Structure formats: structure tokens, C-alpha cells
Image (cartoon, rainbow, N blue to C red):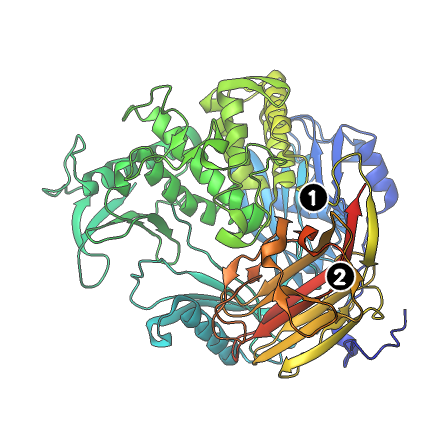
Amino acid sequence: MKVKSKSFRLYSLFAALSLLTPSIASANPTEIDTLQKTNAVVVKDRKTGKVTFIGSNSANGIQIGKQTTAPGQRAIATPEGNARSFLRTYAPAFGVTNSDKDLTEIKSLKIDGLPAVKYQQRYNNIPIWGAQINVNLDTRGNLLSMGGETATIDRLDTVPKVAKAKAINTALQMVAKQYKIRVSELKISESELKIYQPGIVDSTPGKPQLVWFIKVVPKNSLNLERIEQVVLVDAQKPERIVLTFNNTPHARNRQTYYYTSGALPGTLVCAETTIGNNCVSPPGTNDTSKAHTYAADTYNFYRNYHGRDSINGYGMPLVSIVLGINYNNASWDGTNNRMIYGPGYARADDVVAHELTHGVTQYSSNLIYYGESGAINESFSDVWGEFVDLTNGKGNDSAALRWKIGEEVPGGAGRDMKNPPLYSQPDKITSPYYYTGGEDNAGVHTNSGVNNKAVYLMTDGGVFNGRTITGIGITKVAKIYYRAQTTLVTPGTNHYDLYNYINQSCNSLVGTSGITTSDCTQVRNALLAVQMNVSPATDLSICPAGRNGVMSFYDGLESTAKWQYSYLLGNNPWLLSDESTNGSIDGQYSAFIENVASATDTTLAMKTGVTIPSGGFLHFLHAYNLENGYDGGVLEYSIGNTNVWQDARPLFLAGQNYNGALSGSTLAGRSAFTGSSNTIVFSKYNLSSLAGKVVRFRFRQANDSSVGNQGWWQDNFRIYRCQ
């Protein structure tokens, strides 16, 4: 549509190379049709229609005549050759037209005798962050499964306008500002040009962007907040952060150190061959003994159950540092490949195994520690931590403590895999505890409860959410999950992906380790019970069931007629955004304001007031990615068409409320929407106190003088009553 009003300004596209027009490449339709007529499972993305998973309901592979070989024979000599052949046939359905050019092999391995080959997607030879396809084969070279997340990019300018040095400086300034430390205390551990595709890791609107992928860590290796900050810096627009989060997960060649001061790692008190006075066997009461012993238990579990030699699979030393100073946590230091324990935290075997498993995840699936993939990352650590706890013969594994995580650390357990809601975690996707906001890396320590509950049900059995599950025991569940984690799961895996991958892993293992088709039925029932095949939905909550909304004001923000923006400081206009610019929430356009790296304060106000009905509500959709704690947005209102504006926060009723206090901008000291919403959210307000009054509402967004981010989208704004 053409926008005639001057109240908005549309983005101009200055170079044809920067224009992105989404399209979906597809395999020959007959190939997909043929698959769907066999024993194959074909899963498509609900939004894009792209295939995200091809699997089989049999351990014998997908039975297609030209792909099936006689027992003991291989169509092609190597798994890599077979996998590449399948990619040429089916990768277009995933959105990758030229798989030979755009999918590069990153790893080939065998788990339980079954080959798997992993591929990284690239565009113009630049890796797309989180975009990966894994191909699994049976012993004869037949296709067992193919799955992953990909980006479909028609055109993208891949020549950076922002130099790496400039991007590094932006990242350092942002991290120093966020953690209130000096830039001189930080260093860069990784910097690489990548492509960021919204939707692979998070669910905010937007288009693919060229970014500098930068990791910032402390110089002295000891920062009690444990910083390993991932910063995606826009490679085309200076001082703009696209996404940022702390990549440090919290919560047998052994080397255990004790640290009190000076430089890490401290004093070596335990080694594999020489046991110091502070580290004795059987385990003593001090933390170094516990850390050392439980590291061995973790190593032995992976070795005995899966044949894995340490964290990386190749004998990496298990380095543990026990702190003799105040640090109320435990964490895996992925930059230096070592464990950090605060006082008391090494006394829990499940915590030790949990944190070491973050290392296993880093070297296997490399799950991104953000959003749903981060929650799965956390859950995997809980699963293996508890499995070690339940099989090492140490500690109290009574029914009252079975499935609790961290029951032996200071303060007691923090999670319960059997009953996640006990600690405000969801036990299913539709649970009211399921978190869709941006805090805690978008809920990694909260939403881990979904898979935790599923594993409990698979292992011990139970009745949940209308389904009865017969437990199949730790040994079988461990086999199924290890195969999924090492060969099927990709960096951007979400819960729906995991549902397919766990089912596929079980199907592939039928006939091995005592696993039967009946076991796979129980696995599937457990996954269905926790609704892992259901996508988290934005609950609009416009009116209760059975009641309809009567609109006093509605605008889908497809035009500009009802709004006017004003500058209170600087020059940062509100825009109309569509898929060719910054994406939209619903329909063709959304309102959008960029989080610029300069001091600005802009409002977007209704041009005319609305008489608020009795029992009225206000409801709108939005998404945001703003510099956390510094830049943010608020909703304000004015009574009687005056220019006296009040914060709408006291009227908040449901959905996404302000999530942080601001400093450094004109909104300093006020609560606001800040940081990342991670997905599209709604906010709902009770207008009963304004009934009968003529009221205008406005959005207001303010930035400080440094570090930009993506911005704030708004859509489907309505004032109404329910009848």
C-alpha cells in the first residue's frame, strides 16, 4: 500500500543488495510425495511451510526402492557420500537450493554404530548462526532422518560496512556498561562474521542480518558473575546490537584446584595419579574431595553408558576449581574448559554432573544458550546430572529426594523433575509457568521443566495430562537421549524439534540395548503428555471464553491515519515496518521504532481521544529488543485531550508488563519495557477507572547516548469492552 500521511516515514532501500524477499525453495514435489507415501515422517514449519524434519518409524531406514540396499551393502562407500546424496534430493525442501555450495560438513561420527553427518548452512560462504542440518543413516546407508533449522535468503549484502575493530569496540563498551566494569578488564575470545536469522534462535520479527559474532570474557578469568557475553553487532550499521546474552551456563583425567586469591586456577590439590592431603578416597567432607570424586562419577557414567571419553569425547582433562571465596553458584567455563564451584556447590553430585554436561553439550549439539534451545540445554544438564546422582550409589536417593536437583547445595534443591511447578517451572508447554519473556536468557532455567518432566515420566512412568506412561528405566532413556543429543539436535533446536528427535532416536535404536517398539510408544506418550509437539502460543486474552469484544477503537497499524509521532529529544522517527525492512507482527505492516545509539525520546500518540466504555480494556501486540536497563519504552495516557501524560503501568492487567528500570535516558528511574521480549507478546490494561472519560494513549521510547539495538514493534491496538 502507499502511505500518504507524513506522520510516518518508510525506510528507503539504498542498495538492491540489501533487499530481502522471503521465498521457499522446494524439492521436487514428487520426492516429498513419495516420502509421505512410505514409512517416512515429514514435518513442516507451521509458519513458513518449509520442511524441518524427515524421519522414519523404523530402525531400518526410510523404505524407498532406489535408496534401499541389501543387508551388508552400501549404495555409496562412505556415510558422507550417502548423506550428501540425500541432501541433494531433500535439502531444497528445507529451503536450501544448492546444498553442495551452501551446506558444508562440520562433523561425521558414529553413535551406537549408526553414522551421522552434520552440516553448517552458509550464504556467500558466511555461516548462518544456528542454521544446521544433521543427516542420520542406518548401517546400510539408508536415510534414517534429516533435520534442522535453515534460513532462506534471496539477496543479502555480505560486505560489512562496520569494520571488525569497530564492532569489537561496540561489544566491549556494551558489556562494560551492562556489568558496570572497565573495558580494560575485558577481552575478546571469539569474533567472526555471521548471518543472524530471526526465528532460528528467537521469535522476534525481522529479516536476516549480517553481524559480527563476538564473545566477550574477563581478562583475569575470574569474574564472580561469570561473563561469557555473546554480542551480535550489526555489520552494516554502527553501534547497533542485534542480540546479546550471557553464554555461561550456571547452576578422566581429573585436576582439582582450590582458590582463595591471586590468579586462577589456584593450588592443585587433587590429580588423577597423585592424591593430595585435601583430596582423599572415599570422599571426605571438603569441597575439593567432592568435586574430584563426582567428576569421576560423571566421567564413568558417560564412559560406561555411552563409551564417551570425557567432555569432548577425546580424553579432555576434567578441571575443577573450588573457590574459597564468596560465590553462590556453580558454572561451566566454556572458554577455558573448566568447572567453577562456589563454597558448598561441589557437594552435590547432580550439580557437578549438570555443569560438566554443559561441556558435553558444547562439544556435541552446541545448543545455543538462549530461548527454547537454551532451556533444552539446561534440561539436558539436569537429566544427566540426575542420572549420575541416581546411579553412583552415593548420597540420599530416597523417594522424597529422587528427581530433585541440587538438594545437597546450600539452600537446598532448586528444581524438581518429577514436579516442576513446585519451583514455578512448567511441566507442559501450556502451563501458566511457561515463560515467554526475555529475562534469564529468555527463560532457560524456567522452561527446562518441560523436558525434565518428560524424562521423569519416561523413566519412572506415571499418569499425567490424561496419559498413562509405563516407565522404561534409566538405561534405555539414557541411550535414547544421548543419541538425540549427539546426532540429531542442532544448535537452534526448539521443543517441537526435540519431540521429533527423541521419537526418531528411539525408533532408530529399536533392537539395540533392549529397546522395543513398545518402549518407543511410552517415550512418545511422555512427550505428548508434556505437549512437546505444541508450539507456545501468544494468549491474546482479549475476552473470556464465550464473550466478544465490542471495539471503541481498533487499529491494525496498516496505515498511519490515526497516529502522530513527536520528537521530545533528538531525531528518531516511528516508522511503518514490513518484511522488506524490519519485519512485522501481523498483516503487512507494524509500527516500529529503532533503538538508535544516540540520545533520543520519541512518542507515537493517538491523534484523537476515545471515550472509554464502562468495563473497558486496552490490548496490543508488541515485540522489543532494546538495550537492557538503559533504553526502553512505556505506555502513557492523557485525559481530556490535554498534554499531561501519565504512566499506564498502574492500569496493567495481564500479559507482558514493564520488566526493568532504566538509567541514562530521559526515562531514567522509570520502569519500562527493556531488554528482549524474545517473541511476540501482548499487554492488556484495565481501563475501568477511566470509564466515561476521553482519553488518548501514546507509546514513548527513549535511548541514551551509546549502544543501539533492534527496536520496538507494535501492532493490533484496541480499546474495547467484553459482552
Where is residue 232 drawn, in percent x and y? Answer: 55, 66
Given residues 549 and 26, the one toward you in this image is: 549
Residue picked out by circle 2:
584
- Asked whether the residues under the numbered discs 1 and 2 touch, taking CB atoms below 8 Å apart as contact, a structural biologist would say no
Question: Could you tell which of marks 1 and 2 lies nearer the N-terminus?
Answer: 1
Report whether 194 appears left or right of 356. right
Report whether 325 appears left or right of 682. left
The disc placed on residue 32 is none
| Residue type at tag 1 | Asp
Quick check: 155 above or below 26? below
Q: Is residue 514 visible?
A: no
User: Quadrant location of residue 161?
Assistant: bottom right
Q: Quadrant of the C terminus?
A: top right
User: Quadrant location of residue 41?
Assistant: top right
Residue picked out by circle 1:
539
Question: Which secondary structure lies at badge 2?
Answer: loop
**Image point 71% across, 68% down: which residue?**
592
10 Å neighbourhood of mark 1: few (<14), some, or many (≥20)?
few
Residue found at the very far left of the displayed protein:
277
User: Quadrant location of residue 21?
Assistant: bottom right
Q: Quadrant of the N terminus?
A: bottom right
| Residue type at tag 2 | Ser
Q: How many marks?
A: 2
